[in-house]
Image: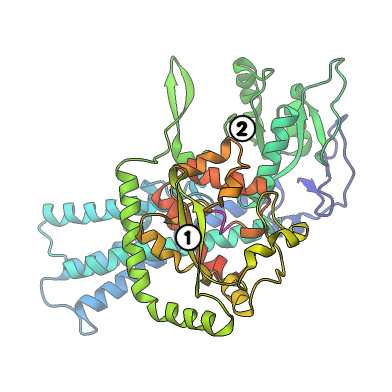
Amino acid sequence: MSMIDERNSAVRPRRGTASKHRAQEPRRRTFARSWLRGEGTVARRAWRAQYVRRIAFGDAAAAGAAATVGYLTRFGPAGMSAGQQASVWMATILPVAWVTLMLVSRSYEERFLWVGPEEFRRVFSAAVLLLALVGTVSWAFKLEIARGFIVVALPLATGLSLLQRYLQRQWVHRRRAEGRFLQTAILVGHRSGVTALHAQIDREAYHGYRVIGCCLPAGPQGESPQAFDGLPVLGTLNEVVDVVHAYEVDTVAVLPSPELDGPALRRLGWDLEKTRAELLLAPAVTEIAGPRVRIRPVCGLPLLHMERPELRGVRRLTKESFDRTAATVGILLILPVLAALALAVGLTSRGGVFYRQERVGRDGQTFGMLKFRTMVAGADRMVPDLAEQSDGNGVLFKMKGDPRVTPIGRVLRRYSLDELPQLLNVLRGEMSLVGPRPPLPTEVERYGFDMHRRFLVKPGITGLWQVSGRSDLSWDDSVRIDVRYVENWSLAFDFMILWKTVGAVFRGSGAY
């Protein structure tokens, strides 16, 4: 059982195992307590198997509910007419067929669960397989399956399965944020790489790893490396397997290192086969999403191939078409809300209803971004006097409790209602629904080389920054998040951000 203290994250090796790298001894836990918290090697594997069973049961329940609704919608409570018995059989076996095709599409494999969109893509693959299977069977055996039943049941089963998987994933994310259901991990490599990966894992706890320490190269004279940044050094690069045995490690993450070349990594993999730990190889390039990374065998070597980000061509045209269509529909739907907000702004303070500010968009072109005015007239002239009180993140001017903001402006900012006029910018082709934050020209003057990547796409009304903390983000995190979006853009990524934006807006966190 892995002994991990919640208060100080100290670790200790398994009893009876000799180790010269010992950390502070925490209080012992009982097995029952560890199991309830999802800790311990056996318990961690048990809860993951239980989670997969819950997902499968949810899929079966979704298909059963969809079959019932489809049957009642098509035939009504009175039942069906003669010759439609095939639809009864279809409704009966739909839950079993649905779960079976989920297995075929590998949607229950742990590598696709908990994070990323691949799990949801495989649900859609199962739906396509089911539709093809129904068509083939009905044609081959001359079965009369009511099309109305299929039209209702199949989309509903897909939607309900996606919903229950999303809700269960969020449940796991909340538990992991509390420190539960985590796999113990050690990082192997040099100090700089270990520091960067440790920070990234800490930022994204929902991936399910708890870093308990690291293994670093020995010193010039063979001396043991020292702890740094609060991360215990459990051993050297030659002692990884001993550390895995001593601390019952679940995951070993190896970073690029000249000491760990091909033969050394191969031997490490062989040694770890005798344990229950999994081996992860972290590439030197970070912040690149899985869909852009492919393994290509070349001369017997598995090489990582990074595909170009999809910033041009058909997919970009699809994004722009979606943006303008959604913006048009959105403006028509919320026109009364826009009128009410404009009236509230105009009646509660002096000045215009809208505020137009110059921002930098795609390819470095400037445009006038529209917002509802949330500050008093002449607010820009007050910036030099307030600069010393800025709560910004290094380049941006941000201030909690900004005295320039009007009472109605605070409400608009809290729920991002002041940004609704930017739908007009989307219609004009200057902005997108989802994209990096549109910067001011004065900010761009202070940009480094990496930050200019954000100008490869249009800025967005919302974005990854909006759902990741908004104004509470540091400048470095803002840079990292914007570049990450540009590097990994896809329509599925946009839809995910739009979905998360709803929750971020209602919470109102990070907005001031």
The verdict on residue 466 being magenta is yes
> Toward which corner of the image does residue 191 lie, by quadrant?
top right
Name the magenta segment's main secondary structure: loop
Which quarter of the rendered picture does the C terminus lie within?
bottom right
User: Which residue carries the number 1 mark?
Assistant: 369
How many residues crowd mark 2 within 10 Å: few (<14), some (14–19), many (20+)?
some
The Cα–Cα distance between marks 1 and 2, rounded to whole angstroms, is: 48 Å
The verdict on residue 129 being magenta is no
| Disc ID at residue 379 | none
At a point 65% along the width and 34% down the height, the residue shown is 253
Magenta stretch, residue numbers? 462-467
| Tag 1: amino acid | Met
Residue 42 in view of the camera: no
Residue situated in front as seen by the camera: 90 or 364: 364
Q: Which of the two discs, 1 and 2, sits closer to the camera?
A: 1
User: Which residue carries the number 2 mark?
Assistant: 279
At a point 61% along the width and 54% down the height, the residue shown is 47
Q: Is residue 447 left or right of residue 63?
A: right
